[in-house]
Amino acid sequence: MTSIDRREADVADTRLWHPFSDMSAVRHSEFVLTRGEGVWIYDEEDRRYLDATASLWYANVGHGRREIADAIVEQLGRLEAYSAFGDFTTPPAQELAARVARLAPVDDARVFFTTGGGEALDSAAKIARRYWSAKGQPERVHLIGRTGGYHGTNGYGTAIGGIEGNRAGWGPLMSQVSSVQWDSLAALEQEILQVGPERVAAVFAEPVIGAGGVLPPPAGYLEGVQAICNEHGILFVADEVICAFGRVGHWFASERFGLSPDMITFAKGVTSGYLPLGGVVASGRVAEPFWDEAGNTLRHGATYAAHATCCAAGSANLDLLEQDGLVSRALELEGPLLEALKPLAAHPLVHEARGGVGLLAALEFTPEANAAGAPGAVFAAARERGVIVRALGQGIAVSPPLTIEQEQIELLATTVGESLDAVAAASVR
């Protein structure tokens, strides 16, 4: 290969290593997006697509909101960022922490900022273990998750998560961690008793499981999880990285289910993705040994925790969610979204349509369709037709911006139906 050939190959072969991607397929065929407006995104040839996934579950207020961009620019011109270690802070960090604490259904809330959801989950796991150590019970280190649960890809989150494909191939993961059937209170109780309540630090649960297939909780299940945790003195952590800030029709999904967790993890919708930000809302109970006992430092945190400009973006985003009435919009549209997709449950490739709890839904495919690669094929067919959906392990999911309109929901359902037909037709040729 000549030097010219190498340069041409470099142009065609991306230098970007994409997350969760088969780079052998992606390296020469990236899908390049250049702008967004509301529920629409545009590629480098200016073709328009309905963003039926709000990117990665997070563009709650839609794309291209000048209000957030202006808040970012203003803060960058004043003070872009500064470390929050020790006693340092900035007004945007103080203001957003106070606002999130007021909104969260957590007793005497305190807010620990991170740079994203995976980091928020790992922070909550470490805080849980460190809390029990500070309370004189260092043996309480066991963490319990659920099958189908997704808690990011950092160390603790990978171990706690219940999607087997995400756990495979890494070698030994974090110890003192287990997973129980996602919808069984009896399984949770049994696991706690088998491990020993005196050894369990925390239970982690997404109010609505997202990446694991959009699984709304059975009636009374989450309330039962909290009751079991309370009975055994175990910390209850609600992972609301997807569910918070309007996705389930409330500021926090825990509010919808009458929960008062010991900790809530959040990210995504707090800035609608305009800048990276996440965090942990911790109860006064969890904060007490660190806030009230001198010298009991939590030796944990990221360089960019409480980043001033990210926090300014968060406050501007929360302003839009409030001013535009978007927090309750999921309650208005969750029924229409599911009803639009329900007829597709009769399609030969589809086993079940799920949703109805928040503005997110899924089609689970039949085992035969999944084995034949239907999730990826339907995703590709829908994108060719101008709609972006998410391929999951056993089907596809949708979670559009909260600004979506009824006619756009109908377009989404129609396009997915056409895509199913196209994939089915191709499979019998």
Image: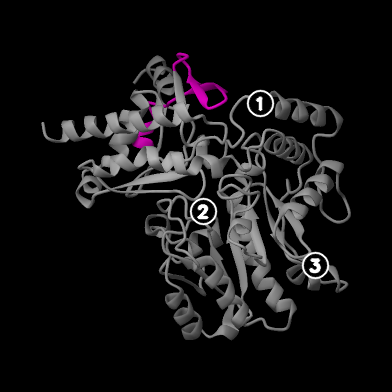
Looking at the image, residue 125 lies above or below residue 41:
below
Q: Amino acid at mark 1?
A: Arg
Closer to the camera, 407 or 232? 407
Closer to the camera, 127 or 22? 127
Q: Position of residue 114 (x, y in %)?
A: 69, 50
Instruction: Sort mark 2 into few (<14), some (14-19) or many (20+) by Cα contacts within 10 Å.
Output: some
Q: Quarter holding the C terminus? A: top left
Q: Which mark is residue 336?
A: none
Q: Residue at x 60, y 56 (%)?
A: 256
The local secondary structure at tag 3 comes to loop
Is residue 201 visible in this depiction of the protein? no
Is residue 18 visible in this depiction of the protein? yes
Q: Which mark is residue 297?
A: 3
Discs 2, 1 touching: Cβ within 8 Å: no
The local secondary structure at tag 1 comes to loop
Looking at the image, residue 276 lies above or below residue 190:
above
User: Please, which colouring scheme is shown?
Assistant: one colour
Discs 2, 3 touching: Cβ within 8 Å: no
Q: Which residue is mark 2?
A: 153
Mark 2 or mark 3: whose residue is earlier in sequence: 2
Q: Amino acid at mark 2?
A: Thr
Q: Which residue is mark 1?
A: 65
